[in-house]
């Protein structure tokens, strides 16, 4: 399936808020429409957000009426700031925007028409590279998956969360393609049910055996010896190996530690933020209360009840068995091993 595509009218996105009941696409013709799609999670998952934002910046460039170079660059930088304000936790968003603006700033004396072309070409490249990175990551990570493994995953880190193929689900997909007969347990992932709505649907589309469980069943399954490993995605990994991912990931990691089960995080190189020393430095996005108090528009909690709704939590590096990247599998001590990826 395609998470996104480009056409003459703009960026085509698979609307993930409507899955699995309806497969429909939206077309974003402006940077502002891309920003709304990111904020409302019509497109979601750190790598997919980064690629979408890159196209958003390309749209800002294509629609710019500025003919003078400096005014054009100012407009692009303002659009980058607007897109970057949509979701603060996923580092791929800022990585992609920084990469796009660098193209403009390093283009010498190129005129505005050439800058517009360079930005669109770079967005295409970011999307293409993401798919290639995921495929490499999947092949590397599949080495950690034994034949017949029963795998727990949290949230959605598949093709839907990326340009294609997936991170955590890319590992599972590659193991399945290698004939390892894996079985997946997907927890529902409250409050927005990405596991139930997206992961379960995506795995069904690929005919990979999947069983849906509620979030509070994971410990029970581990206690009964029904889980062999857990693999999740990541929205930001700090220099010491702390992993920010969808809220509830930390709980899964603690349970894995208690039961002696390997816990893996799979993420592209662009998710590693060497500028942040530890997980405590990560800004955690707080989302609207209605996501917790309603399900598909139906109120399930008392009116006016106080709610906290962090979108992510941070798993300390001591609970992470290994980090699977497109550049290799990284193990503790992470301060040293992650640094080597950058040399």
Image (cartoon, rainbow, N blue to C red):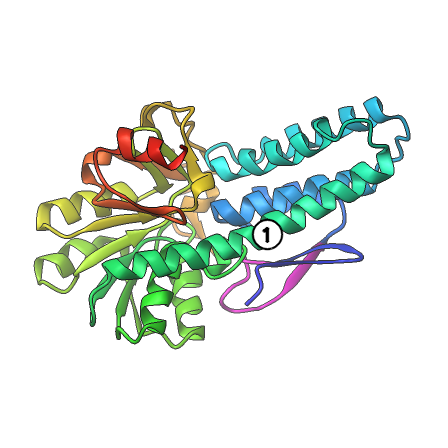
**Residue 290 at x, y = what percent?**
47, 43
Q: Which residue is mark 1?
A: 127
Q: Main secondary structure of the magenta part?
A: loop
> The N terminus appears in which quarter of the rendering?
bottom right
Using the rendered view, name the quadrant where residue 310 is placed: top left
* Quadrant of res 153: bottom left
**Residue 59 higher or lower than 177, as above or below:** above
Q: Residues within 10 Å of mark 1 (few under 14, many from 20)?
A: many
Numbered disc total:
1
What secondary structure is found at the residue carrying circle 1? Answer: helix
Instruction: Let me know if residue 196 is in the magenta part.
Output: no
Which residue is painted at 14% across and 52% down in the image? Answer: 261
Instruction: Give how far across and how far down residue 195 sits, in percent.
Output: 37, 58
Image quarter of the C terminus: top left
In front of the other: 4 or 295: 4
Q: Is residue 22 magenta?
A: yes
- Residue 71 occupies which quadrant of the picture? top right
Q: Which residue does the image show at 30% across and 61% down from the upper left? A: 142
Whether 315 is drawn above or below 52: the answer is above
Magenta extent: 15-27
162 or 14, which lies in front? 162
Residue 339 placement (x, y as % from top left)? 34, 31
């Amino acid at each position: 399936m395609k998470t996104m595509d480009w056409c003459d009218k703009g960026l085509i996105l698979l609307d993930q808020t409507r899955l699995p009941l309806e497969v429909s696409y939206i077309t974003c013709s402006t940077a502002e429409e891309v920003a709304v799609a990111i904020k409302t999670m019509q497109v979601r998952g750190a790598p997919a957000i980064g690629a979408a934002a890159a196209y958003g910046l390309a749209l800002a460039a294509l629609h710019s009426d500025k003919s003078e170079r400096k005014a054009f660059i100012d407009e692009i930088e303002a659009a980058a700031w607007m897109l970057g304000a949509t979701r603060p936790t996923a580092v791929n968003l800022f990585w992609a925007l920084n990469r796009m603006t660098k193209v403009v700033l390093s283009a010498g004396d190129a005129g505005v028409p050439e800058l517009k072309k360079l930005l669109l070409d770079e967005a295409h490249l970011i999307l293409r590279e993401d798919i290639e990175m995921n495929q490499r990551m999947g092949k590397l990570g599949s080495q950690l998956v034994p034949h017949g493994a029963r795998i727990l995953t949290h949230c959605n880190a598949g093709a839907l969360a990326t340009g294609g193929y997936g991170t955590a689900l890319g590992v599972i997909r590659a193991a399945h393609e290698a004939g390892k007969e894996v079985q997946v347990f997907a927890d529902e992932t409250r409050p927005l049910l990405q596991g139930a709505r997206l992961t379960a649907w995506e795995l069904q589309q690929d005919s990979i055996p999947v069983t849906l469980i509620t979030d509070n069943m994971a410990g029970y399954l581990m206690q009964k010896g029904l889980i062999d490993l857990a693999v999740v995605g990541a929205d930001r990994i700090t220099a010491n190996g702390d992993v920010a991912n969808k809220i509830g990931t930390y709980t899964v990691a603690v349970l894995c530690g208690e039961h002696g089960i390997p816990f893996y995080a799979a993420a592209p190189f662009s998710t590693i933020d060497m500028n942040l020393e530890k997980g405590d430095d990560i800004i955690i996005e707080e989302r609207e209360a209605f996501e917790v108090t309603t399900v598909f528009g139906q109120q399930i909690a008392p009116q006016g009840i106080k709610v906290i709704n962090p979108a992510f939590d941070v798993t300390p590096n001591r609970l992470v068995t290994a980090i699977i990247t497109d550049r290799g599998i990284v193990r503790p001590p992470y301060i040293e091993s992650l640094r080597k990826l950058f040399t």
